[in-house]
């Protein structure tokens, strides 16, 4: 196991602005499913300020050791053991969750993986639960800042399946999975927090 957990300066910067929104969006109690937990910094930061919530981290196999190292250092029983989840290859957990969260994942996934993420999240949420998706997104097929255009070009140069996703396309995808876009919240550094709500009447 790694002696030190991995670290993201971006996660350090955006944790508080995201938490400020999640405090009004997440339920007071329940378990939150996180897709692509990365370094685990969000799980640690959010659970410190959301005492009624349990957090279920997930990520691909390569990131699990670093996640486990960080969570062992934090020693917070409300952060559950991280689960291996490649959205295209691994079985999803069978539990139902009171909300789902993912940050900076949609643009580094292939489109097939983005679709799989929305399908999997929709299947694991209780009725009326929210899926909060953070990151850079295009509006009406347009970049919201020159830096986002540069970032998108960099991503696609490394992997043509990556790239900043358009908000309307994600909204249509969510609707196909019985999730409606409830809020489009502008965040610092040309990012957004998209909040989808699973339509009632579904288990």
Image (cartoon, helix red, strand yellow):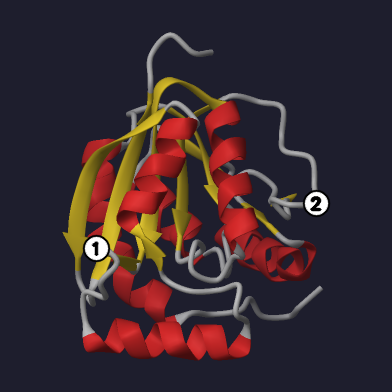
Measuring 31% from the left and 51% from the top, which residue is drawn there? 168
Measuring 39% from the left and 78% from the top, which residue is drawn there? 10
Q: Secondary structure at mark 2?
A: loop
**Is 135 or 154 nearer to us in this picture?**
154
Whether residue 79 can be seen here: no
**Is 139 or 58 nearer to us in this picture?**
139
Q: Report the disc number at residue 89.
A: 2
Measuring 69% from the left and 47% from the top, which residue is drawn there? 81
Q: Quadrant of residue 158?
A: bottom right
**Vertically, is 141 above or below 152?**
above
Q: Quadrant of residue 60?
A: bottom right
Circle 2: is it few (<14), some (14-19), or many (20+) Cα within 10 Å?
Answer: few
Select label 1 or label 2 by which is in front. 1
Which residue is farthest top?
201
| Residue 203 falls left or right of residue 9 | right
Whether residue 2 can be seen here: yes
**Vertically, is 196 above or below 1?**
above
**Residue 63: x percent and y percent?**
71, 68
**Is 194 or 98 nearer to us in this picture?**
194
**Residue 155: x percent and y percent?**
52, 84
**Vertically, is 179 above or below 200?**
below
Q: Quadrant of residue 188?
A: bottom left
Q: Report the disc number at residue 139.
A: 1
**Vertically, is 147 above or below 105?**
below
**Residue 175: x percent and y percent?**
41, 33
Measuring 53% from the left and 80% from the top, which residue is drawn there? 7
Q: Are marks 1 and 2 in contact (CB under 8 Å)?
A: no
Q: Secondary structure at mark 1?
A: loop
């Amino acid at each position: 196991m790694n002696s030190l957990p991995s670290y993201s300066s971006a996660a350090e910067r955006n944790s508080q602005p995201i938490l400020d929104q999640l405090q009004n969006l997440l339920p007071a109690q329940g378990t939150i499913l996180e897709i692509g937990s990365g370094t685990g910094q969000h799980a640690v930061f959010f659970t410190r300020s959301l005492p009624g919530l349990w957090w279920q981290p997930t990520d691909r196999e390569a990131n699990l050791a670093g996640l486990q190292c960080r969570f062992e250092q934090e020693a917070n029983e409300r952060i559950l053991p991280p689960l291996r989840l490649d959205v295209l290859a691994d079985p999803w957990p069978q539990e139902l969750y009171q909300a789902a969260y993912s940050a900076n994942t949609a643009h580094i996934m292939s489109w097939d993986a983005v679709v799989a993420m929305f399908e999997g999240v929709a299947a694991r949420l209780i009725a009326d639960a929210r899926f909060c998706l953070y990151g850079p997104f295009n509006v009406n097929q347009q970049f919201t800042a020159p830096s986002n255009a540069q970032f998108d070009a960099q991503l696609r140069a490394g992997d043509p399946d990556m790239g900043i996703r358009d908000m309307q396309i994600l909204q249509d995808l969510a609707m196909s999975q019985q999730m409606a876009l409830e809020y489009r919240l502008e965040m610092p550094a040309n990012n957004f927090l998209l909040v989808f709500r699973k339509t009632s009447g579904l288990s």
